[in-house]
Image (tube, rainbow, N blue to C red):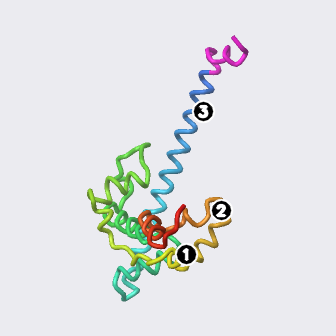
């Protein structure tokens, strides 16, 4: 038995592992709850001023999404989240909370995700790039995957590449 294997059965090592796992669980939870709280704050803040625009809600959402460089869907979910759960203490998920779980279980009905209003789909890959140029430039530095990871809709990627006879 090598030296590392002998540690695995010692009480101090088992205690160390238990504490490390507890730290990981706690910090992962803190990260997820922080994101949930952030989207709740975002929705709440937008709701405070949404009437000041004197524009249709859809236009307000489009403008805010474009300006803060978040998807329209994300802004819509944040607004809906703040409306249907005005107080975060109403959440019962505990340590198992995540933004994607809230979206899936509380903000959408089965099949509703496709029904959310969306911006008009671009006709070509060039349109996608042109429409998202500022966002792409800001984020290209952060990824070696380049443009493909920034296409705004999963379906656009495939459809446009097929339409333009481009292959990956």
* SS under mark 2: loop
Dot 2 or dot 1, earlier in sequence: 1
Work out whether 120 lies above or below 86: below
Q: In this view of the protein, which residue sits in the foreground, 37 or 59?
A: 59
Label 3 sits on residue: 20
Q: Which residues are magenta?
A: 1-13
Label 1 sits on residue: 129
Work out whether 98 lies above or below 69: above
| Cα–Cα span, label 3 and label 2 | 30 Å
Dot 1 or dot 3, earlier in sequence: 3
Label disc, if present, on residue 25 of the rendered structure: none
Label 2 sits on residue: 142
**Is the N terminus in the top left, top right, bottom left or bottom right quadrant?**
top right
Q: Relative to 139, is 164 on the left or the right?
A: left
Q: Main secondary structure of the magenta part?
A: helix
Task: Determine the residue positioned at 62% across, 64% down.
Answer: 146
Q: Are marks 1 and 3 in contact (CB under 8 Å)?
A: no
Task: Determine the residue positioned at 30% across, 59% down.
Answer: 108
Task: Determine the residue positioned at 46% across, 81% down.
Answer: 63
* SS under mark 1: helix
Q: In this view of the protein, which residue sits in the foreground, 36 or 157?
A: 157
Dot 3 or dot 2, earlier in sequence: 3
The mark total stands at 3
Q: Percent x, y for residue 158?
A: 45, 64
Work out whether 78 lies above or below 56: above
Q: Residues within 10 Å of mark 1 (few under 14, many from 20)?
A: some
């Amino acid at each position: 038995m090598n030296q590392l294997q002998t540690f695995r059965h010692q009480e101090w090592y088992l205690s160390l592992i238990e504490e490390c796992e507890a730290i990981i669980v706690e910090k992962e939870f803190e990260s997820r709850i922080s994101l949930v709280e952030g989207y709740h704050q975002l929705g709440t803040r937008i709701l405070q001023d949404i009437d000041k625009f004197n524009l249709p809600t859809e236009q307000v959402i489009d403008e805010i999404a474009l300006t803060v460089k978040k998807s329209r869907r994300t802004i819509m979910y944040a607004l809906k989240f703040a409306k249907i759960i005005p107080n975060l203490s109403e959440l019962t998920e505990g340590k198992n909370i995540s933004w994607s779980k809230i979206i899936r279980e509380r903000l959408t009905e089965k099949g509703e995700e496709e029904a959310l209003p969306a911006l008009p789909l671009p006709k070509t890959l060039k349109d996608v790039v042109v429409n998202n140029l500022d966002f792409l430039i800001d984020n290209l530095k952060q990824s070696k995957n380049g443009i493909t990871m920034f296409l705004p809709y999963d379906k656009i990627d495939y459809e446009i590449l097929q339409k333009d006879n481009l292959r990956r």
